[in-house]
Image (spheres, helix red, strand yellow):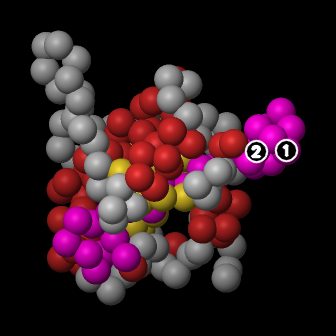
Amino acid sequence: MNALPAVVGRDEFDALVVRTDYHDDVSWRAVTAALAQPWGDRGDGRYAAGLHLLDDPAWAGAGVDDVVAAVRADENLAVVFLADRTTMRTAHHALLAVTTLTREECQDDEDHRRVTEFGRSFRTVPAGVHDIHANLSIGNLGFEEYAAQAHDEPEGIYRIS
């Protein structure tokens, strides 16, 4: 795979979504429409969706390792979401949520095993992207907690309550 473009201009409060499949523009429009919906409950309404979408064919076919390596420079990024072939081909359009945390960033091997107990990725419906990103960004919840919730679901997909 060729070198991927640098991610520039992402606000730390914006979830990063990388499109890696370019076979179905209709599905991509459905995914982005779902991602753009207000989310959560802040008492006086819902939060606006903060997104940084990478929709550049240079990312076509990029794998998890490629994407994580390309976004590593962003120290404020705990999770990246991939709109991959599975996202585009399924009715629920579940994106792949991938932790950017490496073993070196963990306290020790045990800490890394805990964070990645259910793997370093899981699927989430578009409505879950903002909840996951926000809570990981402020340290309210850990990646492993969301991965465990997805793991406990019959389809293995995190669905926001």
Closest to the observer, 143 or 137:
143
Q: Secondary structure at mark 2?
A: helix
Q: Is residue 159 left or right of residue 118?
A: left
In-image side of 23 versus 40 (left or right):
right
Using the image, tell me which numbered label, if any, was put on residue 112: 2
Which residue lies at the image location 74% right of the left edge and 47% below the top edge? 113
Count neighbours of disc 1 (C-alpha within 10 A) and say few if under 14, some if 14 to 19, many if 20 or more.
Answer: few
Q: Nearer the viewer, residue 86 or 8?
A: 86
- Residue 85 is tagged as none
Residue 46 shows up from this direction: yes
Measuring from the top left, give residue 97's x and y in whole percent. 48, 55
Q: In the image, is residue 51 part of the stretch drawn in magenta?
A: no
In the image, taking residue 20 as reference, residue 87 lies left or right, namely: left
Could you tell me the amino acid type at mark 1? Asp
Q: Position of residue 109 (x, y in %)?
A: 85, 44
Q: Which residue is tagged 1?
A: 109
Image quadrant in which the C terminus is located: top left
Circles 1 and 2: CB atoms closer than 8 Å: yes
Closest to the observer, 72 or 141 = 141
Q: Which residues are magenta?
A: 86-113
The kind of residue tagged 2 is His
Q: Is residue 112 magenta?
A: yes
Work out whether residue 14 or residue 83 is closer to the camera in this orientation and state it: 83
The image shows residue 69, relative to residue 15, as above or below, that is below
In which quarter of the view is residue 66 placed?
Answer: bottom right
